[in-house]
Image (cartoon, rainbow, N blue to C red):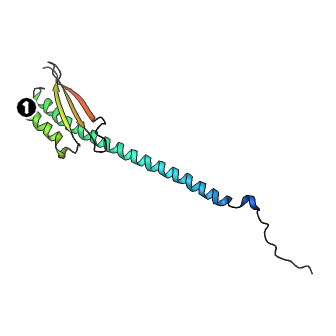
Amino acid sequence: MPRHTDRAAPSRGPRQAGVALIEVLVSILLFSIALLGLIGLQAQATSLSLEADYRSRAALLADEIAAQVWMKKTVALDSDAITSWKNKVASSASLLPSGTGGFDRVGSTNAVDITITWKPPSRSSTDAASSFRTRVTVPSL
């Protein structure tokens, strides 16, 4: 009766030694690059979301003074109302960092330009400030 002997699997030879390790290292490298890309995208999305939040706050503040113009049916608001509104824009309660408000009549027309500017703390001092501008025109009666 023939004897069966267990034979060892043939060795792969010196050419293939460590190939699996290199494949794993390359896949880890690719995964790391993809992960860093996703982190960058998340940071950009957060930044854009914060900028949109500032812009909506500015729009609400502009709407507040525009409502006063429409309510009084004139662009010639008293200086106390304009000063109070500008102080509100500049206060920390507005949640606009370094916020300033502008209320400028357009010539001798029944129109006024409302401008709100702010500068997020993430920007350097040399970067331009963000702004929101709208024009309100009161129709002549």
Q: Which amino acid does label 1 sit on?
A: Ser
Residue 35 appears at what percent x and percent y?
49, 52
45 shown above or below 140: below
| Residue farthest to the bottom, as pictured | 1
Q: Quadrant of the N terminus?
A: bottom right
Residue 50 appears at what percent x and percent y?
32, 44
Q: Residue at x 44, y 47 (%)?
A: 40
Residue 103 appears at what percent x and percent y?
16, 30
Picture quadrant where residue 64 is located: top left
Relative to residue 29, is residue 76 drawn left or right? left
Nearer to the camera, 75 or 70 = 75
Residue 132 appears at what percent x and percent y?
26, 33
Picture quadrant where residue 4 is located: bottom right
Query: How many numbered circles are shown?
Result: 1
Q: In which quarter of the image is the C terminus?
A: top left
63 shown above or below 2: above
Q: How crowded is mark 1: few (under 14 residues within 10 Å), some or many (20 or more)?
A: few
Residue topped by disc 1: 79
Relative to residue 134, is residue 19 drawn left or right? right
Q: Which residue is drawn at 14% across and 20% down?
A: 140
- SS label for mark 1: helix
Q: Which residue is drawn at 36% across and 42% down?
A: 48
